[in-house]
Image (cartoon, grey):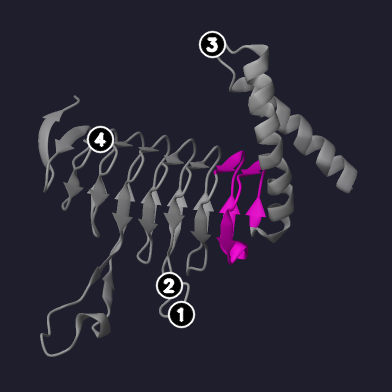
């Protein structure tokens, strides 16, 4: 049984990797890439038994921390790059679709690793990616659609600290959790911040460095602090 699984996984991995070599890759460049991905493949095999479920190939980089892995449900061809931190403990789990990539040093954190309230979790659709150094604070539920590009150093927050009572320190006033949704085919450019309670409509572009504080209509291009619509893609 284990042999058949290893054989099937290896064939799937080779087919997947071969499909990624487009353009003028030299034989040497392919060999270097394959050697590196071999390590990803082996680490994926070691992590896989602890995941809640994974349908297909799992590739995992160096120094990846997956806490409470039983809450993680993955589709086909999951890639988790080096130094990623996934804290999966959440009421609704972490559900990742097919061909999801999580970039280097990204943090996905629905719950505090030292105790406290358990967060809601995260859902990511097919063919979507989280960029390097991104922070996804999914204590409130965050839903990301299909074919969404999230660039480096993007932050998404699904909660706000309460601070209404000046007689109580803010740290003890708790938080308010809110839903965040990014619909299909969106591009969230580098260093953008998405705040709690926001829905970003299908096909929208969030310009680099924007702070999104309110809903974005479908097919909009927004920019600025706070972000405002600068044009429509339609």
Q: Image check: 233 left or right of 230? A: right
Is residue 31 one of those drawn in magenta?
Answer: no
Q: Image check: 35 left or right of 185? A: right
Q: CA distance from mark 3 to mark 1?
A: 49 Å
Q: Viewer-nearest of labels 3 and 4?
A: 3
First in sequence: mark 3 vs mark 4: 3
Q: CA distance from mark 1 to mark 2?
A: 6 Å
Q: Which residue is mark 1?
A: 115
Up the image or down, 24 lies above or below 202; here it is above
First in sequence: mark 4 vs mark 2: 2
Q: Which residue is mark 3?
A: 23
Where residue 7 sits, quadrant-wise, is top right
* Mark sitting on residue 112: 2
* Mark sitting on residue 204: 4
Where residue 160 sits, quadrant-wise, is bottom left
Residue 71, horizontal then vertical, whole percent: 57, 63
Q: Residue at x 42, y 67 (%)?
A: 120
Q: Tag 2, which secondary structure?
A: loop
Residue 176, horizontal then vertical, whole percent: 26, 72
Q: Residue furthest top?
A: 24
Is residue 56 one of those drawn in magenta?
Answer: yes
Q: Tag 3, which secondary structure?
A: loop
Residue 173, horizontal then vertical, whole percent: 23, 83
Q: Residue at x 32, y 36 (%)?
A: 186
Q: Image check: 231 left or right of 129? A: left
| Label 1: how many Cα within 10 Å (few below 14, some 14–19, many 20+) | few
First in sequence: mark 4 vs mark 1: 1
């Amino acid at each position: 049984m284990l042999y058949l699984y290893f054989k099937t996984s290896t064939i799937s991995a080779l087919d997947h990797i071969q499909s990624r070599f487009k353009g003028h890759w030299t034989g040497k460049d392919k060999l270097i890439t394959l050697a590196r991905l071999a390590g990803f493949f082996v680490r994926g095999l070691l992590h896989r038994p602890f995941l809640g479920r994974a349908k297909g190939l799992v590739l995992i980089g160096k120094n990846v921390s997956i806490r409470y892995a039983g809450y993680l449900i993955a589709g086909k061809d999951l890639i988790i790059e080096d130094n990623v931190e996934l804290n999966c403990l959440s009421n609704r789990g972490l559900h990742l679709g097919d061909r999801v990539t999580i970039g280097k040093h990204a943090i996905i954190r629905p719950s505090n690793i030292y105790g406290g309230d358990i967060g809601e979790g995260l859902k990511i659709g097919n063919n979507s990616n989280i960029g390097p150094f991104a922070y996804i604070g999914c204590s409130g539920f965050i839903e990301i659609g299909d074919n969404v590009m999230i660039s480096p150093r993007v932050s998404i927050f699904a909660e706000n600290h309460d601070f209404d009572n000046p007689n109580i320190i803010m740290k003890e006033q708790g938080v308010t959790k809110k839903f965040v949704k990014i619909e299909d085919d969106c591009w969230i450019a580098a260093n953008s911040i998405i705040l709690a309670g926001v829905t970003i409509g299908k096909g929208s572009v969030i310009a680099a460095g924007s702070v999104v504080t309110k809903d974005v209509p479908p097919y909009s291009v927004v920019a600025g602090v706070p972000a405002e619509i600068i044009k429509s893609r339609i």
